[in-house]
Amino acid sequence: MAHEPKDYGHLKGSLKGLSDSQLEQHFTLYKGYVAKLNEIEARLAETANTAPNYSFNDYSELKRREAVAFNGSFLHELYFENLGHDNTVAPELQSALDARGGLEKIIADLKAAALCGPGWALLTHNRRDGKLHTYFIAEHHLGLPIEQELLIVLDSWEHAFMVDYGIKRPDYLSAFMENIKWSEVSRRFIYARR
């Protein structure tokens, strides 16, 4: 069954500091990941898995790239879904934020993670220790920490901000933080704790 890209057009005109042009570029890139995921899955269904190896094999190459398209698709969906400014922080999430130094500290940590380079900054709920953590991952298929529920997904690749901010990543990060949909982050946190 093919994956269908979701429509995030409702975000246009509603975000502070992110233009419709910037969003359209980002939506196009996201749709490309979904298309590539569908292509890889279709090819995997037809490719023999009888001789995989490290050097080269069609099946091996498809499996190596599958996580790129999969995570590229779904990290973007989580990113778009946690946009749409509101201040609705559930009491359970507020307690978890307070336990890690408060909202301002978490936001500062998330911004700092995003400045580590092009890639993704994440706020997660760790299923092992029950605490909130921030992470930086340079590529969506490498370094994604296990045992984590993703609460905030921040795309810090240039394609997320170049139209509006050029090379001014810190300005984009400030705009992103103003656009966090805390009701969605709260929903993810409550779901993660169940």
Image (spheres, rainbow, N blue to C red):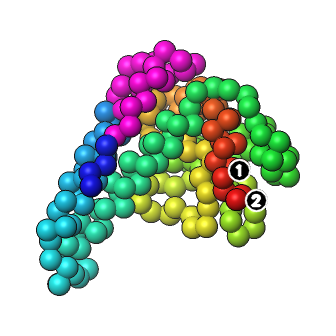
User: Which structural element holds mark 2?
Assistant: loop
Residue 181 rendering spot, x and y as whole percentages: 63, 32
Residues 2 and 104: in front is 2
- Total numbered labels: 2
Query: Which image quadrant: the N terminus?
Result: bottom left
At x 52%, y 37%, the residue is 81
Say if 18 sits above or below 51 in the image.
above
139 with respect to 66 (left or right): right
189 with respect to 36 (left or right): right
Tags 1 and 2 touching, CB below 8 Å: no
Which residue is denoted by mark 1 in the rendering? Answer: 190
Query: Which image quadrant: the C terminus?
Result: bottom right
Q: Mark 1 or 2, which is nearer the eye? A: 1
101 with respect to 76 (left or right): right
Residue 35 rendering spot, x and y as whole percentages: 25, 46
- The answer to whether any part of residue 125 appears in the image is yes
The label number, if any, that marks residue 91 in the structure image: none
At x 24%, y 60%, the residue is 41
**Residue segment shown in magenta:** 5-27
- Quarter of the figure with residue 45: bottom left
Say if 102 sits above or below 17 in the image.
below
Any magenta on residue 166? no
The label number, if any, that marks residue 131 in the structure image: 2
Say if 52 sits above or below 80 in the image.
below
CA gap between label 1 and label 2 equals 13 Å
Residues 53 and 74: in front is 74
What amino acid type should be assigned to the residue bearing mark 2? Lys
Residue 25 rendering spot, x and y as whole percentages: 34, 28
